[in-house]
Structures are given as C-alpha cells and as structure tokens.
Image (cartoon, coloured by chain):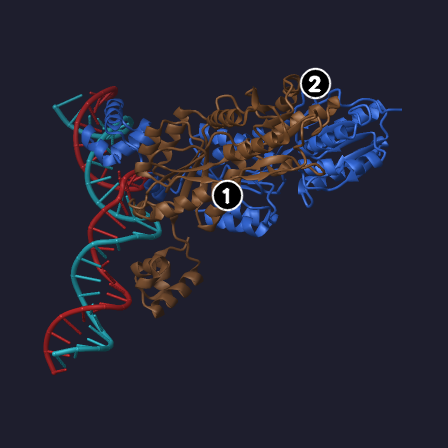
Chain colours: A blue, B brown, C cyan, D red
Amino acid sequence: MAGLEDVARVAGVSASTVSRAMSRPEMVAPRTLERVRAAAEKVGFRANPAARALTTGRTGFFAMLVPDLENPFYAAIIAGAQAVAEEHGRWLIIAVTEGAAEREGEVLRELRDQVDGFVLLSPVGSARDLVAAHRRKPVVVVNRRVNGLTSLTVDTPGGLARIFDRLAELGHRRVAYLAGPPGSWMDRRRRDELGEHAARLGLDLRVVGPVYPAFADGAAAATEIVESGCTAALAFNSLLLLGLMYELGRRGIKVPERLSVAAADDMAFADLPGTPVSAVRVPAGELGGRAVADLVEMAGAPGAARRPASRKLPTEVVLTGSLVPPAR
Amino acid sequence: MAGLEDVARVAGVSASTVSRAMSRPEMVAPRTLERVRAAAEKVGFRANPAARALTTGRTGFFAMLVPDLENPFYAAIIAGAQAVAEEHGRWLIIAVTEGAAEREGEVLRELRDQVDGFVLLSPVGSARDLVAAHRRKPVVVVNRRVNGLTSLTVDTPGGLARIFDRLAELGHRRVAYLAGPPGSWMDRRRRDELGEHAARLGLDLRVVGPVYPAFADGAAAATEIVESGCTAALAFNSLLLLGLMYELGRRGIKVPERLSVAAADDMAFADLPGTPVSAVRVPAGELGGRAVADLVEMAGAPGAARRPASRKLPTEVVLTGSLVPPAR
DNA sequence: AGCGCTACTGCAAGCGCTTGCAACAGCGTA
DNA sequence: TACGCTGTTGCAAGCGCTTGCAGTAGCGCT
C-alpha cells in the first residue's frame, strides 16, 4: 500500500533518498536515515516486490526442482532448504519434475526469469543442459555430480562400506542388499560401490530388487531375502527395512538373531524403541540447507564468483545391536 | 531476452498490439494475430514476469503455508496442489510455519504482495486474522473450518465412526484410540467425535496418548494398549499403527486375532501385502488439488466471486480382515 | 577568505508490460 | 453519396522502484 513516495512526503525527502535509505543505508546521512526510517515505520512502508524485481532483475525467489514430493528423503531436504532460505529472507518455489528430463528442462526455462537461482534435486537432464541453465541463473545440484556446477552429494556408499566392514568383522559371509528405486542414479552407484567393496572383503553380495521403496515392497522382499541364505541385509531406505522387519516379525523370524539389518537414508521416523536399527544417517536437512546457502552466496556475487565447488557430505554411521554375529 | 518491442518490430505492428495478441487475442484481427504469433515464435518471445506483475498486480504464484514438511500427510497435500497448479500454469511457493500463529501471520504479511492467493494447511491463526488476509488476497483453508473463508476439510471422524460401527457389530466392547500429535486441532476434534459416537454405541473408548505420530511411538504404545484390555485399536495415522503392529508382532501377539486394528490418515506406503489394514483413506492429494483449483477460480474473478464455500470431502473407508470379532 | 573536496541529495530516465483513449479504416444503411 | 458504427490499431501514460548524473552544501586546508 504505502510506497516510497508516501514515505518521502512524510520524511520530507525525495523518493530516491528513501530508496537508498532502504537498500544502501551507508549512502545516506545518519540523521536523514533516522527520519526516513521513522517515516517508513509510521506509514507502514512495504516495498513493491514486482517493481523491485523489474528494475533489479532480482526476485528473492529460488526454485527447487524435486522429482517426487512424497519421498521423505526429498521432503527432508526441502525442509532444510526452506529453513535456510527463510534465514536469508528468500522464498522457495517448488516444482515437481517426476524425474523426467523433459519436464525438468521446461521448468528451468519457464522459471529462469522469475527466480534468482535453482536447486536441482537428483536432476536427470544432460550435464550440457544443466550447465547451460547455469549461465543464466546460478544452479546448485544435489545428489548428483555434474562437471562445471556446484554439486552436493552424500557419501552414502562410504557409510554402507563401513557397515560391510562391520559385518565382515562379525563373521558374515553372505549379505543381501535390498535395492532402491528402479532406474535411480543413486541406487545404481550405490550398488556398484557396494559390489566392489564386498568383493574386496570377500563377502557374497546378493542384490534383491530393485523395488519401489515403500513399506509393502520391503515386506514383499522378505521371502527372497530369507531364501537367499543371507545372514544380514541392508535396505535402500528405512521404509523398506521397516516393511521387511514387519514381515519377518510376522513370520517369527527373529531380528537380529537370524538376520542382522541396517538401512541407508535413515529417517527419524524409522527409529525403533528397544532395538535401534544400524543405519547410515544421511544429513538430508543439511544437504538442502547447504544448497540454499551456496545459492545465496552465488546469487550475491555477480557471475564471477560462480565458481563450481563440489562437496561430498559425510554420513554418520550408527552401529547398534541390530548387527550381531551370524547364527552359526 | 526478447521483449514485446522485438516482436513488434518483426511483425510490423506496435508493442500494444503484441501485448494484446498475447493476453487478449480476441481483440486483434485474425491476420495480425497470426503475424504476431509467427514473429513471437521467431524471436523467442518470453514475457517478463516482473513487468507483467508490476502492471497487473498478478504474479502467477500461490503461497502454501504448511506446518511441517516432513509429515507425509502434508507432503501428499502439497503434491496434489502442485499438480493442479501446474495445470493452470501457476507456481507454488512453500512456506513452513511450524504451526506457530506468529510465524503464520508474518508469512501472510510478507507474501501478500507477491502472490495471487494463499492455501493454508491447518492454520493456527485466529479466524479474525485469516479473514483479514482474505480481504487482500483470496485464501483457501485446508483442514480447518473458518467462518467466512473457503474451507476444505475431510470427514475423517465420519469414517472412523463407520469403523466403530463395524467394531460394535463384531461384538467389541472396549476399543483403544491411539491419539495423534499433542495439541493438534484435528486430533482434538477427532477425539471428541469419537467419544460421542462410542458413547452412542455403548463402546468403552480408551484414549492412549496423544503421542507424536512416528513409528517408534506407535511401538511404544503397545504396552499400554495391550494392558488396557482393549480388543481393538484405532491409530491416528498409519505410521503409528505400523509401529504398534511391529511391536505386537515382536511380542507374538497376533493381529487381528488378539487385537483388531485400523488407522486413519492412511498413506500409500502403509499398505501391507497379505493383510491389508482397515483404514480411513484420506484423499490428501485431492484436498490439495481442490484447494488450488478453488484459488484459481477466486483469483480469476474480481473479488465479487470470493464467496466462501466450505466443503467436506468424504473419506473412503476400507474394511478388511484386520477387523474380526474379539477373542471371546 | 578562498579553493577543492567529500558527502549527500534530488532529478529524471528508465525497467517491460498493460490499458484507456483517440484515431482511423471499412462497412452497412438511408 | 454521406453518416454513423464497429472493429482494429497506435499513442502515451503509467505501475513503483533503482540508479547514473548533476547539483549543493559544508568542511578542512592554506
């Protein structure tokens, strides 16, 4: 409602001075500044964001492209991102891509004039397209490494490897990995690295799945895992593990006595009373937070400081009583 | 990059005509229209959203205020909302309120000049404040009824009542309700209505909790529920129920033989293979979708059509083998 | 006292699009 | 043939804020 002009009138200065008082206070005399601020307060000044965006080209919005909102992993990342955005007075606009490269490109195109930058969660577009987008507005990629772009990944394979180490140490010889979403870049990589690590340790790795990471699918995988003769199982995420454990419980198969278990991508809600599950804790919130923090920094600097910086966040490995020596 | 002026030059018309060709094609002659469109295509015209917002006051954004992103119920609502927003070429900006009235008001104030309307999920602000917000920009309230505003609620109590009916019919006399988030408006109402309905049916209702709706908390409630002597249990949501069932399974307490179970706020991931759980299915996605659809409609009409319309969406009650006569 | 600076402030020109109003065809009608 | 419409189009004035540039006052200095 109340614009620059209104404040100017009350403070007895020009609109330019009010504008400067607001965005570059060091340019106006202390006494004037005070007067302007009082006037602004009095008339209830609120800058018109559209006008500001028109002149400066900055909107205060960041766009976050996410494959799937119902995946708790992404939800956690968004939550972290949103918290940091809020700290910086930025707003997050969320677009769902359903993991389709085409849709991703479309959103990037549509939104590039309305935001100050992009956070891309597990993007599927070609590196070429993503880098191109970065030329117009800063881009931060989460959960994938892209040459030439600031990327944030999590060392889940490293964490899982430590769990394998522990299993080997306990004497397990055959271990199941309940694999994640079909076609997932992350799952693919995880599987590869696990395979290598297992070979190194002399473990026999049985991959079950990939399956859609939901409770029911975890339960459904129980039979195959039990019959595989494995003495330990890792699940792609907690939801799968919960489902698996549920089904094992129903069949009277004791955990961890008969099957040691652990999960990656651990979510808070997977915590169990009594027997906490061993897990690779992924700092999802931090991931989102960092992404936005980086974006703020890049958006502040004029192009030059858009130096890509890949970072791999460490995971926290929680080893609990859910890992025990195999029933001999 | 390419603006009205560029198109105008190529098409040999004035910028005004181009503008009209874009937003009110019925005002320009068919032949001109065609020429303008071709030119726009050729130069790759993209309207500058900030400029448009400045002149029209419309931004194409809706804001969605949500208490908590990690709650799958809200995530599902957002997903539904986002899908419909996309259909209408609108974008959703997400703000987390943490269920704090103060924060809610702040966001409403900050965002009111940058969006065309608000969707408020389970808002906690006073009805007075919410109605005030509605005077500047259309507001749709989800999961709470507010006089004078378009509200969308779900008839969960009705669904639960039908489950109670069924339980009574099966011969149960004492039933547990594992209550939801402490302080939740929704849980409060649900409890009240359940109480009345139970009384009407002559059922003895034991409320356990309220507890935070997570897997572990469901498991933790097992003891109290078992010791209460109830022969059936309803849980505030699926996560709680899964936790409860997990713990019962671990203790060798058979479901549903010893305890009939059901949940409200059922999520897809809670589906079980084998023994599906009786549940009150909440159409979360539809809830979000409808909210946005209503908002689009309101934002289109000029104030006048902002006639509040409360709607209560029906739930789908799924009755399965998880409800059986009590062990006598 | 006079000069050169520095520190502030105001002027005015946009940013790119929308829109009321005026201008002007081309047409039907009398 | 002249007049009044209706249908199109262009003109120009903003929308509210930012910012380069120019002007002014006050200061320290010699």
Q: Is residue A95 above or below residue A174?
A: below
Residue lying farthest to the right in this orientation = A328
A225 left or right of B34? Answer: right
Which label sits in the foreground, 2 or 1? 1
Under mark 2, the amino acid is: Gly
Q: Kindly identify which numbered label has been placed on residue A274.
A: 2
**Residue A127, can we see it?**
yes
Q: Amino acid at mark 1?
A: Glu
Q: Which residue is mark 1?
A: B286
**B217, B171: nearer the viewer:** B171
Instruction: Point out residue A132 in the picture as x, y percentages from the top left corner.
Output: 54, 49
Q: Which residue is drawn at the image coordinates 51% and 51% (left, top)?
A: A106
Q: Residue B166: give x, y in percent of width and height.
A: 59, 33
Identify the chain of the residue marked 2, using the numbered disc in the image: A
| Real-space CA distance between mark 2 and mark 1, rounded to the nearest whole angstrom | 38 Å
Query: Label 2: few (<14), some or many (≥20) within 10 Å?
Result: few
Q: Nearer the viewer, residue B210 or A304?
A: B210
**On screen, residue A14 above or below A171:** below
Location of residue B24 by image quarter? bottom left
For residue B2, the mark is: none
Q: The C terminus of chain A appears in which quarter of the rendering?
A: top right
Under circle 2, the secondary element is: loop
Horizontal side of residue A128 vs B247, given as left or right: left
Dot 1 crowding, Cα within 10 Å, few <14, some 14–19, many 20+? some
Determine whether label 2 and label 1 are within 8 Å by CB. no
Q: Position of residue B238 (x, y in %)?
A: 61, 31
**Secondary element type, mark 1:** helix
The residue located at (77%, 35%) in the rendering is: A222
Find residue D7 and report its horizontal and vertical position in percent. Answer: 27, 68
- Based on the displayed image, in which of its 4 quarters is residue A235 positioned? top right
